Image (cartoon, rainbow, N blue to C red):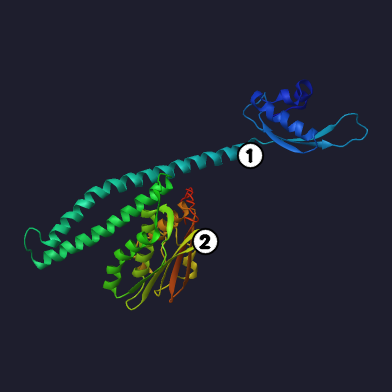
């Protein structure tokens, strides 16, 4: 046995335990003597590869002149082995996840350099800076530039998500008027909305919205939400952005009259590469936009909510506790973002 009765009688309980485990055994006995039950796990000195689980509790005996204890000992070797196996598997899984994240971050960075060159040369051809070209080749240049731009957006989203998962994404917190960052996002999407025949409206606060946050992240959140809304709203529909303060929170909402989201899809949205709708709708994106918005929102200590009715449209709202109230400048609290799989 891992712990024999003769050894206990001869050596005593504490001395029968492996030396590093004796303080824990002594602490459990002291706790039981004070009137509280205790549980401790230790290795016997005579069998260091085994584990013993000891449960000790006070035993009330009025006839006894001093406090007495009652104890139960179990062989916990199998349980310890299972726990050790689970801990090993957890460490390996975290190491693999960290390796995947580092790989994505490095590859995304390496891909952006040649892709920017492709976009630059395609833009030169589109503008015919070195003379005219046949219309067919001009169309090819437009297609290259459009496809390259889409790929660059995807790479940037992957890079940002990998940085967040690796806890390497640093918020550049500063004080600014939130209306400026959001207005810039609206301007970038307006051409896309006009080309598709979607009415884009922005309802911003008449008063300055002084916030302490990451301006680039706020612009990226608004841009992703607007792009998604325009993408899934048919011609003749509308997309509306509202931006205002609600106490210490900045409230940004984007609503549309598009295809909407089914109830079973709502639970999945916001995770990397998760998309809603049929194959034709999924082909229009990558499923990274909302995931990035959710991650950036949580990095600011905020939250994102989605409300939708299938066939009637959707509304996404983010609330960020970043308003500068009464001269105070609340710091955004970075939070760890766990990958959801």
Q: Quadrant of residue 143?
A: bottom left
Q: Nearer the viewer, residue 265 or 45?
A: 265
Residue at mark 2 to residue at mark 1: CA–CA distance:
52 Å
Query: Is residue 215 shown left or right of residue 32?
Result: left
Which residue is the extreme one toward the left?
A: 131
Query: Is residue 328 shown left or right of residue 25?
Result: left
Whether residue 280 is visible to the viewer of this picture, yes or no, is no
Give the number of callouts. 2
* Circle on res. 312: none
Counting from the top left corner in percent of width and height, residue 4 is at 74, 27
Look at the image and tell me in which quarter the N terminus lies: top right
The answer to whether 87 is drawn above or below residue 316 in the figure is above
The answer to whether 224 is drawn above or below residue 333 in the figure is below
Query: At 30% from the left edge and 71% from the top edge, which residue is drawn?
Result: 193
Counting from the top left corner in percent of width and height, residue 316 is at 45, 66
The answer to whether 269 is drawn above or below residue 107 in the figure is below
Q: Quadrant of residue 23?
A: top right
Which residue is the extreme one toward the right?
A: 63
Q: Nearer the viewer, residue 318 or 173?
A: 173
Residue identifier under label 2:
247
Counting from the top left corner in percent of width and height, residue 137 is at 12, 64
Residue identifier under label 1:
79
Query: At 91% from the left edge and 31% from the top edge, which residue is drawn?
Result: 64
Q: Quadrant of residue 3?
A: top right
């Amino acid at each position: 046995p891992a712990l024999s009765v003769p050894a206990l009688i001869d050596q005593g309980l504490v001395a029968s335990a492996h030396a590093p485990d004796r303080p824990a055994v002594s602490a459990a006995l002291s706790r039981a003597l004070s009137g509280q039950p205790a549980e401790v796990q230790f290795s016997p000195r005579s069998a260091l590869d085994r584990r013993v689980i000891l449960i000790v509790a006070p035993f009330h005996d009025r006839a006894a002149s001093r406090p007495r204890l009652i104890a139960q000992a179990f062989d916990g070797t199998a349980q310890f082995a299972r726990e050790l196996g689970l801990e090993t598997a957890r460490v390996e899984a975290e190491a693999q996840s960290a390796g995947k994240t580092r790989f994505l971050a490095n590859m995304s960075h390496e891909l952006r350099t040649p892709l920017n060159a492709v976009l630059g040369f395609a833009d030169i051809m589109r503008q015919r800076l070195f003379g005219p070209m046949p219309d067919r080749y001009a169309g090819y240049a437009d297609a290259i530039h459009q496809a390259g731009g889409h790929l660059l957006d995807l790479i940037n989203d992957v890079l940002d998500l990998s940085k967040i998962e690796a806890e390497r994404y640093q918020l550049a917190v500063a004080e600014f008027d939130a209306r400026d960052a959001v207005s810039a996002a609206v301007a970038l999407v307006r051409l896309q909305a006009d080309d598709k025949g979607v009415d884009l409206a922005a309802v911003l606060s008449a008063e300055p919205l002084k916030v302490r946050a990451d301006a680039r992240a706020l612009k990226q959140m608004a841009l992703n939400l607007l792009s998604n809304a325009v993408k899934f709203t048919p011609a003749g529909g509308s997309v509306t952005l509202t931006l205002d303060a609600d106490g210490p929170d900045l409230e940004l909402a984007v609503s549309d009259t598009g295809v909407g989201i089914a109830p079973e899809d709502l639970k999945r949205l916001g995770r990397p590469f998760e998309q809603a709708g049929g194959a034709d709708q999924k082909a229009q994106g990558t499923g990274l936009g909302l995931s990035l918005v959710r991650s950036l929102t949580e990095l600011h200590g905020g939250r994102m909510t989605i409300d939708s009715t299938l066939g009637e449209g959707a509304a996404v709202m983010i609330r960020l506790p970043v308003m500068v109230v009464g001269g105070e400048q609340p710091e955004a609290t970075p939070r760890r973002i766990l990958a959801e799989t």
